[in-house]
Amino acid sequence: MDLSSKSKLSRLIGCQLTSLTYICLALVTMVLFLRAVLLHSFSGYGVIEWNNLDLILSHSLLLNSHDKGIRRDKYLEVPQIVWGLNNQKIAFARACLTARMLNRTLLMPSLSASLFYKEIDRLQPISLDKVFQFDKFNSLCKGFVQLGRYSDLKNQTGIYDLQKGSGRKWTVERDMEHLKQSSRGHVDEHEVVRIVGKNPFLWHDHWPVEDYARVFECLVLVDEISKEADKVVSKIRQIGKKHRSKTEMIQSDFDANSESSSTATAPYIAVHMRVEIDWMIHCKKLEQRSGINQICSSKQEIIQRVGNIVSSESPTVVYLAVADSLLNDSSILSGWKKGLLPFEKKKLGVDGIYKKHPYLIQSAIDYEVCSRADIFVGNSFSTFSSLIVLERTQKMKRMGITRSCDIDVRWPSYAYNILGESNGPQKWMTNMSDSTLQAISYGSNAITC
């Protein structure tokens, strides 16, 4: 090949390399630009706002984009989960996050359908998939935590019993070091690690609130229970719609030119009213120990503060989530502000729906009814109230709302045990940046706007 041919070939190769360089640079620039737009526009979990449009992404895809998969050939087994519904949800989430740290699939634990704190032999075990959807959980939490069934075991190795420590000397730091040691070496060689000892609710807490929230999001009620909640909510809205229609008909008689407002969806308020005797004894003792005087609330105080939330006189149903011992107490239904229509499950005529189910399912129905309310009011020292507010905070977070003090939001929540503006209850959102769940656990206070 002569010098002229070599020169032409060099120029040709040079041009091609230059073109490829420009193409690569252009692609890199586009990727960086799109990444900047998406990160800037990211709002909450699963929603991207782009040119004023909401692009709903698959929740499982979001989890996969940040997390590596959980091993499906190594498992963690935990003791039966006990106590109230929300204590059981916290215990379950804590077990899931422990399994995640060990990079193991959590064997589906048993919940407790009955409520016995000391008589363990009287507990009624109920499989978790009788309450929450198993496949839905794994789909939503894919890549973050994973549930497995005992039928998945190959039984190729023996079970390793991991004893959880207890007592004052078993500190948070010591517990974490114990877990780290159990994630490697001869312990990790076993197909199943079985934690022996206390109910997971009593384990030391190592996980941030956001991690708990991700697990809670994946807990979807089975259709049978969800439909029971549908019936209760439908009855509440029907009563609200009926009363609003009557009011509008009366108003239209006085003003022939007025236009009737829509009553297609009648809003309702849900109040988790903790005034039963055992709660009042507990909260009084808690106030004495903690030196905090904003834990207990009387019926009159709750009724008065809830009445100061809504300024409109349009009839609004107030659903009272109360203990069965209060269903025959007529005083909880009297003294409410004009326009607020108090109903508990007995007056609503849905107590039969609850009675055919064990305690755990009854609580799950009430939890769902309160979660769906247009306004929720609870006690900030109650686990039931606290987890509902956490769930509602998650919904607002997806909409890009991180504070509710100065604006009207779609799912507002309030704590009636703390005095807020205009003698009403304090606005309440969960602080999602807390490093542990202690801030919203039973007996703790977590108020943030």
Image (cartoon, grey):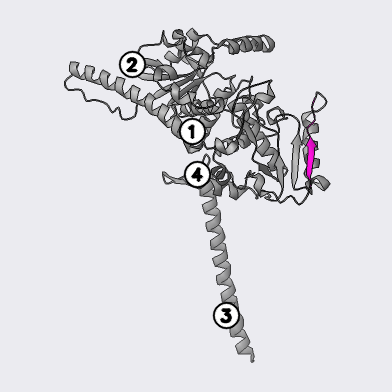
The foreground one among 319 and 56 is 319
Which residues lie in the magenta part?
Answer: 158-166
Circle 2/circle 3 CB separation < 8 Å: no
* Residue type at tag 1: Ile
Residue marked by disc 2: 313
Q: Mark 1 Cα within 10 Å, few/some/many (few <14, many 20+)?
A: some
Numbered tag placed on residue 41 in the rendering: 4
The mark nearer the N terminus, 3 or 1, is: 3
Task: Name the image quarter holding residue 104.
Answer: top right
164 part of magenta stretch: yes
Q: Of the two numbered discs 2 and 4 on the same chain, state the one appearing first in sequence.
A: 4
Which of the two discs, 3 and 4, sits closer to the camera? Answer: 4
Q: Earlier in the sequence, mark 2 or mark 3?
A: 3
Callout 1 secondary element: helix
Q: Secondary structure at mark 4?
A: helix
Query: Which residue is labeled 3 in the image?
Result: 12
Kind of residue indicated by mark 3: Leu
